[in-house]
Image: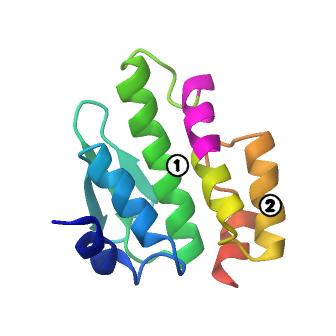
């Protein structure tokens, strides 16, 4: 599958102008990206010893993007630093922040959400706050 084909297949899940960038990352790292039925406990997962990332299908586009970036951050940090790192340690934070900055600088986030993403860049969180979930639901 080409980047363009993958981006088209995913475009309804992401905010406008994001799916091509995600498709590029997925293909670059040979990630199996699965959009899955909603789960109560997890919004997304990255499997430690596999190239699989899953994200719940029922998320609003901006939350879908943030969860995807969170999980890609896990994937990249595991590939770069090995499986002995802490799940939300400095290695993950570094990779997650790089991804957030890319989309922030690209201007995909509305102003209020961009301000919240800036806070996330300063202090990356392991979980998605209720505030952030509500903000993404109303965009």
Against 52, is 8 above or below?
A: below
Which residue is labeled 1 in the image? 70
Position of residue 72 measured from the top left corner of the image (x, y, whole percent):
43, 46
Q: Give the quarter of the figure containing the N terminus.
A: bottom left
Residue at 23% x, 46% y is 30
Residue in front for this viewpoint, 85 or 3 = 3
Q: Residues within 10 Å of mark 2 (few under 14, many from 20)?
A: some
Alpha carbon distance from label 1 to label 2: 15 Å
Figure quadrant of residue 93: top right
Seen as rendered, the residue at the extreme top is: 84
Position of residue 136 measured from the top left corner of the image (x, y, whole percent):
66, 75
Q: Which element is circle 2 on?
A: helix
Residue at 62% x, 60% y is 103
Q: In the image, is residue 8 part of the stretch drawn in magenta? A: no
Q: Earlier in the sequence, mark 1 or mark 2?
A: 1
Q: Residues within 10 Å of mark 1 (few under 14, many from 20)?
A: many
Q: Is residue 98 left or right of residue 67?
A: right
Marks counted in the figure total 2
Residue in front for this viewpoint, 52 or 44 = 52
Segment tinted magenta in the rendering = 89-98
Q: Which element is circle 1 on?
A: helix
Which residue is labeled 2 in the image? 116
Find residue 88 and name its label: none
Give yes or no for contact between labels 1 and 2 (Cβ–Cβ under 8 Å): no
């Amino acid at each position: 599958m080409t980047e363009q084909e993958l981006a088209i297949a995913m475009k309804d899940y992401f905010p406008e102008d994001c799916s091509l960038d995600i498709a590029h990352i997925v293909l670059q790292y040979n990630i199996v990206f699965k959009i899955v039925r909603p789960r109560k406990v997890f919004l997304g997962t990255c499997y430690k010893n596999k190239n699989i990332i899953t994200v719940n299908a029922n998320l609003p586009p901006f939350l879908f993007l943030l969860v995807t970036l969170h999980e890609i951050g896990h994937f990249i940090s595991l590939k770069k630093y090995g499986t002995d790192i802490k799940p939300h340690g400095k290695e993950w934070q570094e990779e997650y922040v790089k991804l957030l900055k890319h989309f922030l600088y690209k201007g995909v986030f509305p102003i209020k959400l961009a301000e919240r993403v800036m806070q996330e860049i300063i202090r990356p969180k392991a979980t998605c706050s209720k505030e952030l979930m509500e903000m993404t639901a109303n965009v």
